């Protein structure tokens, strides 16, 4: 009995550790801070996304009154307008579909998030076929990297030509098992990015590109201002949805917007 109890305890510890890794991929800044102290591989290029955080840094909570930031208190918009949601920073939006589609869907994702992987594999293809390809939806991908592995992969993602972005986005999600780890594995990240034609020299240069890094930080900070706290989170027009959506969930939300008057734009 004692040996069985020991085996059960060890098994429970393994399950808890695995669960912690899954949650770390999709949660908010508290886990980002904890994950960001992982050591970089020796000789790997440093970046703003990859530099270690202070060991005793307090987790940032965007909803805590008086939450400190380098710019002071962070504003969180309680009821953003569509113009607020569609505000663009220094980097171009990564989107597919008609620019003037009647409904805009925005997905905030982290490349290490298993829920994002599942959405991209099982929900996104149907949404693309039924709504994006038919001109009803413009779909925007916004980066919300959680953890340094996701941050470095996101830099690689933005480093390829815009025409290859969506394909590489899918490769990073599909191949999470090959590169996602508690340690930042630069070689494994580049191995995925190289499938889109990104050379190691180009990747290393992008990891040091401060304008690119600042632009990605703007996307994430703006997401926090819009109430994003984890991944995947969505905006359907200016309505925030902070949960995992299956196809029927998203279809109902899109159809409601189309029925509300946006459908007239499809015929024009």
Image (spheres, rainbow, N blue to C red):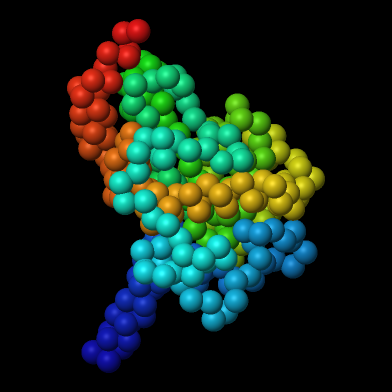
Q: Quadrant of the N terminus?
A: bottom left
Q: Position of residue 60 (x, y in %)?
A: 46, 68
Res. 178 visible in picture: no
Q: Position of residue 227 (x, y in %)?
A: 37, 53
Specify whether 203 is left or right of 234: right
Front-most of residues 101 and 183: 101
Front-most of residues 208 and 120: 208
Q: Give the residue drawn at x 32%, y 14%.
A: 265
Front-most of residues 74 and 222: 74
Up the image or down, 244 lies above or below 6; here it is: above
Q: Position of residue 56 (x, y in %)?
A: 54, 81
Front-most of residues 13 and 52: 52
Q: Residue furthest bottom?
A: 2
Q: Give the residue drawn at x 56%, y 49%.
A: 218
Specify whether 219 is left or right of 114: right
Q: Give the residue drawn at x 35%, y 43%.
A: 80
Res. 204 visible in picture: yes
Up the image or down, 84 lies above or below 103; here it is: below
Q: Position of residue 20 (x, y in %)?
A: 39, 68
């Amino acid at each position: 009995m004692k040996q069985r109890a020991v085996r059960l305890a060890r098994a429970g510890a393994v399950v808890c550790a695995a669960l912690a890794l899954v949650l770390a991929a999709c949660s908010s800044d508290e886990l980002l801070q904890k994950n960001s102290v992982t050591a970089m591989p020796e000789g790997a290029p440093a970046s703003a996304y990859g530099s270690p955080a202070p060991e005793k840094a307090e987790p940032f909570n965007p909803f805590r009154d008086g939450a400190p930031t380098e710019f002071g208190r962070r504003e969180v918009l309680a009821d953003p307008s569509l113009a607020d949601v569609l505000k663009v920073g220094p980097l171009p939006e990564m989107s597919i579909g008609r620019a003037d589609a009647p409904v805009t869907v925005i997905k905030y994702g982290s490349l290490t998030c298993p829920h994002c992987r599942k959405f991209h594999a099982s929900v996104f293809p149907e949404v693309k076929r039924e709504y994006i390809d038919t001109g009803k939806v413009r779909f925007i991908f916004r980066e919300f990297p959680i953890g340094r592995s996701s941050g470095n992969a996101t830099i690689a993602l933005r480093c390829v030509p815009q025409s290859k972005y969506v394909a590489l986005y899918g490769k990073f999600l599909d191949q999470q098992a090959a590169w996602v780890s508690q340690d930042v594995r630069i070689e494994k990240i580049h191995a995925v990015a190289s499938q889109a034609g990104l050379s190691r020299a180009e990747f290393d240069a992008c990891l040091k590109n401060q304008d690119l890094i600042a632009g990605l930080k703007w996307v994430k900070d703006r997401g926090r201002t819009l109430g994003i706290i984890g991944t995947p989170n969505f905006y359907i027009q200016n309505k925030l949805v902070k949960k995992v959506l299956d196809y029927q969930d998203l279809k109902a939300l899109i159809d409601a917007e189309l029925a509300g008057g946006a459908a007239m734009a499809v015929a024009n």
